[in-house]
Amino acid sequence: MVPIFALVATVAHADMTPREGAFAREPSVRELQRIAARVAEVHPERARSWLRRAGKAALLPSLRVTVGRGYGELVRDTMNQPIYTSNDNWRFEVQATWQLDRLVFDRNELRASREAQRVGARREELLTRVAQLYFARRRLQLDALAQPDPPAATERDCDIQEPGAVSDGLTHGALSAGRPSP
């Protein structure tokens, strides 16, 4: 049996993300942060992609297609009254328009930039929150190992489970699922 002091020292030495011992089956804080970012879909690559696409969108034309059949105004008489004639022809029109000024500046770039900033801020908040929950839980676990106290054990267990439950909510259960076996 490993003395509790040795286990606590091993955990503290391993930057509180141990790969062995009592917490070996738990994912590291970095793994939880990566999962939380994926679940919340806060990826900086996506925002950069929006900015690139907004700039390239000006190269594409706006298309207008008109299709018609039937009556048409062919001639106007001297009194400016139209003479309508019936015809059985189809008419197709295709119009392409480029807005070349958008190659220099496009309002969509501002929207994409604001959204990228919002996503970046949300990502930072999320990763900070996951790290805070992880280390708050880890401190409680280490305290429970260092000072096992039967009268307070139930309350301490609830204190340990609370940040774990919030972390599971942010990561779709990754903390409870544990680290995948190699």
Image (spheres, helix red, strand yellow):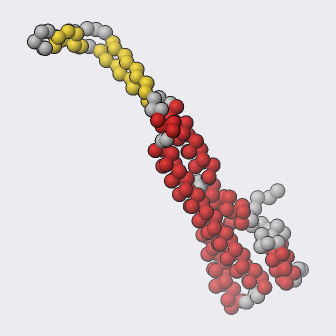
Give the residue at the far right of this rendering. Answer: 1
Q: Locate residue 63 relative to residue 120 in the image: left or right.
A: left
Judge whether 40 appears above or below 112 on screen: below
Quarter of the rendering occupied by the N terminus: bottom right
Judge whether 162 appears above or below 84 on screen: below
Asked if one can make out residue 119 in the rendered structure from this viewpoint, the answer is yes
Residue 41 figure quarter: bottom right
Q: Residue 159: x percent and y percent?
A: 64, 80
Q: Locate residue 125 relative to residue 111 in the image: left or right.
A: right
Residue 150 figure quarter: bottom right
Asked if one can make out residue 178 in the rendered structure from this viewpoint, the answer is no
The residue drawn where x is 35% and y is 22% is 66
Q: Residue 15: x percent and y percent?
A: 79, 72
Q: Please give the count of numbered marks on the rendered protein.
A: 0
The residue drawn where x is 39% and y is 26% is 64
> Which is nearer the eye, 145 or 126?
126
> Which is nearer the eye, 9 or 50?
50
The residue drawn where x is 31% and y is 9% is 89
Q: Residue 146: x percent and y percent?
A: 78, 85
The residue drawn where x is 37% and y is 16% is 92
Quarter of the rendering occupied by the C terminus: bottom right
Give the residue at the far bottom of this rendering. Answer: 151
Residue 19 figure quarter: bottom right
Q: Locate residue 134 relative to residue 73 in the image: left or right.
A: right
Judge whether 116 appears above or below 121 on screen: above
Q: Residue 10: x percent and y percent?
A: 85, 76
